[in-house]
Amino acid sequence: MKPLLIDGAWITTSHAEENRNPSNTDEVIGLYAHAGRAETQAAIEAARLSFPAWAASTPQFRFEILNKVADELTLRKSEIASLLSREEGKTLREGLQETERAANIFRFFAGECLRPAGDLIPSVRPDVSVEVTREPLGVVGIVTPWNFPLAIPSWKIAPALCYGNTVVFKPAELVPGCAWVLAEILHGTGIPKGVFNLVTGKGSVVGNTMLSARDVEAVTFTGSQAVGSLVAQASIKHMRKLQLEMGGKNPLVVLDDADLDLAVDCAVDGAFYSTGQRCTASSRLIVTEGIYGRFIEKLTEKCRGLTVGDALDPATDIGPVASASQLATDIDYIEIARAQGGNLRCGGDIVKGHNHGYFLQPALFTDTDNNMRINREEVFGPVASVIRVRDYEEALATSNDTDFGLCSGIMTTSLKHAAHFRRESRAGMVMVNLPTAGVDYHVPFGGRKASSYGPREQGRYAAEFFSTVKTSYIRP
Ligand SMILES: NC(=O)C1=CN([C@@H]2O[C@H](COP(=O)(O)OP(=O)(O)OC[C@H]3O[C@@H](n4cnc5c(N)ncnc54)[C@H](OP(=O)(O)O)[C@@H]3O)[C@@H](O)[C@H]2O)C=CC1
Ligand SMILES: O=C(O)CCC(=O)C(=O)O
């Protein structure tokens, strides 16, 4: 059994669960301890007790710890990427990219430990100066989803530790393996005991215990809207600092003047790579009349050419869906879209001959309108739909007509339209002539409306969530 990490010690439990490879469900990857209430409370207590010393540690010490994690992730990237692909179903190429991204995130925040923070401001009063400093929050609870089992934990754990907080980390039940490797690496750096704690287990047990604990000063969560709102309700009782990253229904607008090949490539990448299981996925393709026919033809041809298969097979373009329940959700939405009048142009079938994995041929719908459920609700699978519009104005209005606001994109050679879209799109991130998915690791990440709540993640903006500001008035 792979144990929990609490207060610097590996702890086994009376209950453990196995995880399996979604490319081949006969393959058991490992057996992982499931924490109960008592273990979760012990992890929170360890994080509370270790906080003062970690908060007071030198930036150089924290820099060295985070840098060692980056080095180790880089050194072990092939092994870790292969585990990621076996556990979550991303292709090996995508697994390697995610592992490199995690290493870069730790390296970035190692550097952040050493960068100046704060301001010295003259007061409006004579002989007084104002010093604005940043301080850590305390114990931070980290709750993550399964779709980026290494990168999302990294972009929460690295800044939490960088700014002097201690951590209790609860990964998604589906992907304990990547979380465990991250814990093993952190432990191996010589990080003081209790500063980083791993509690694998159920959201309803570990997550709930974390949310009801007074000593958890802040919670950062990525996952579904349904669980996000539970996290918010539980946290508000404690007036706890909160950061939520939830779903998206991201539009990719394709205008008449777009480079056709580039538009098709970006649509395929954004909609279907990583099996469409990205909150930044381009699930709504909004296409103007003049390019519609040519775009659909090329896109359909390209979709038909995608190879769905085992995540570790180098010939695979699209790995399996991550779980049986996600596959059932995808199939449900395909049926709903059909029933509401969508035309299933290609894909949408379970791939034959792969009985031991969750393989779905990417589904492309045409003849949909923005009011259909397929265009209003997040599917989180390899399912995309095309909405035909008259012109740029209708495309912009349609792209903004959504409850979500994570990411948006436009394919055009018109500087005027690109600039207007960048300004008027009501999303946290805007892409011009790029897929909506696939973001940099050193710049702010997050959205608007139902997609996100609280300060942005990643880059220097992460300081807004993971630290608090103190304003001191000083008369010598
Ligand atoms: N905007 C974004 O950045 C992203 C959004 N998502 C969204 O996440 C969804 C898929 O991820 P998924 O992991 O299934 O999402 P969930 O919301 O089901 O789970 C996210 C995390 O919350 C935990 N959790 C579940 N119940 C509770 C609870 N009562 N209290 C505290 N924690 C709990 C889960 O644990 P357990 O696994 O044990 O249930 C998991 O660790 C998609 O629908 C997508 O919309 C995903 C990735 C990124
Ligand atoms: O598109 C990306 O690079 C990031 C996506 C993401 O964070 C997510 O799907 O959870």
Image (tube, rainbow, N blue to C red):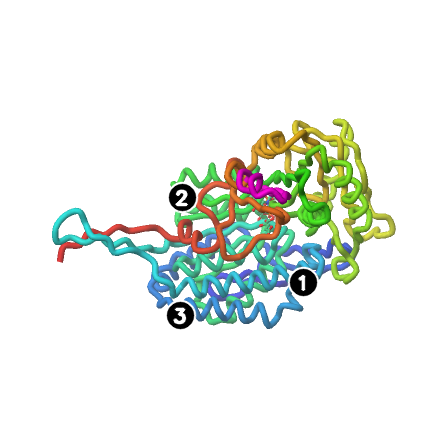
Q: Nearer the viewer, residue 17 or 216?
A: 216
Residue drawn at (71%, 43%) of the image: 325
Taking the magenta stretch, the answer to whether it contains residue 412 is yes
Find numbered disc 3 in the image and state the secondary structure of the residue it sits on.
helix
The residue located at (35%, 68%) in the rendering is 58
Mark 3 Cβ inside 8 Å of ligand 2 = no
Alpha-carbon span between mark 1 and mark 3: 30 Å
Direction right: furthest residue: 353
Q: Which residue is mark 3?
A: 61
Give the residue at mark 1.
83
Q: Nearer the viewer, residue 33 or 58?
A: 58
Towards the viewer: 136 or 282: 282
SS type, badge 1: helix
Residue 240: which disc? 2
Which image quadrant: the C terminus? bottom left
Q: Amino acid at mark 2?
A: Arg
Q: What segment carries the magenta color?
A: 408-421
Mark closer to the chain start, 2 or 1: 1
Tell me the residue at 57%/39% (across/down).
417
CB of mark 1 within 8 Å of CB of mark 3?
Answer: no
> What's the residue type where badge 1 is placed?
Leu
Q: Examine the image and state in which quarter residue 329 appears.
A: top right
Q: Is 168 or 322 nearer to us in this picture?
A: 322
In this view of the protein, can residue 379 be seen by the observer?
no
Where is residue 375 drawn, in percent x and y? 66, 33
Dot 1 crowding, Cα within 10 Å, few <14, some 14–19, many 20+: many
Judge from the rendering whether residue 104 lies leftward or rightward of residue 84; answer left or right: left
